[in-house]
Image (tube, rainbow, N blue to C red):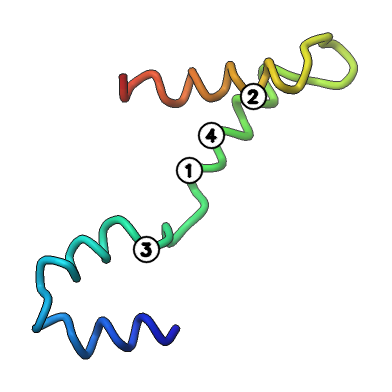
Amino acid sequence: MLTVHWWRQHECQYPRVADVERRYLSAPSTSVASEPLFSSAGDLYSDSGNRMAGQLVEKLLFIKHNLKYV
């Protein structure tokens, strides 16, 4: 919390750095992005009907949700 107060006081001195700090160093305000991930995981993996290892499921989910950035 101390960092937030410091940036509010000094953002006029360092406007470009403050903008970068706000964009890239701040935490997302909500966890909505995790909901589609859990939904996809439920589609791929279930304890009773799937023999896929957890690491394989993790890799498939990573590819599915990051393919749009490649």
Of the image marks 3 and 4, the number of the one nearer the N terminus: 3
Say what secondary structure mark 1 lies in: loop
Q: Position of residue 43 (x, y in %)?
A: 66, 19
Q: Are marks 3 and 4 in contact (CB under 8 Å)?
A: no
Q: Residue at 26% of width from left, 65% of height from top?
A: 21
Query: Could you say which quadrant of the image residue 41 lies in?
Result: top right
Residue type, numbered disc 4: Pro
Q: Find disc 3 in the rendering and name its residue.
A: 26
What amino acid type is highlighted by mark number 3? Ser
Quarter-of-image position of residue 9? bottom left
Q: Say which label, 3 or 1, has the lower sequence index.
A: 3
Residue assigned mark 1: 33
- Going by the numbered disc 1, the residue's amino acid type is Ala
- The residue mark sitting in front, 1 or 2, is 2
66 sits left or right of 40 in the view: left
- Tell which circle, 1 or 2, labels the residue nearer the N-terminal end: 1
For the residues labelled 2 and 4, the Cα–Cα distance comes to: 14 Å
Q: Which residue is mark 4?
A: 36
Residue depth check, mark 3 versus mark 4: number of the one nearer the observer: 3
Please state the horizontal and vertical placement of residue 59, each as a whole percent of the image. 60, 19
Q: Is residue 15 above or below residue 43?
A: below
- Residue for badge 2: 58
Give me the C-alpha separation between circle 1 and circle 2. Answer: 16 Å
Q: Are marks 1 and 4 in contact (CB under 8 Å)?
A: yes
Please give left or right for residue 49 compared with residue 10 in the image: right
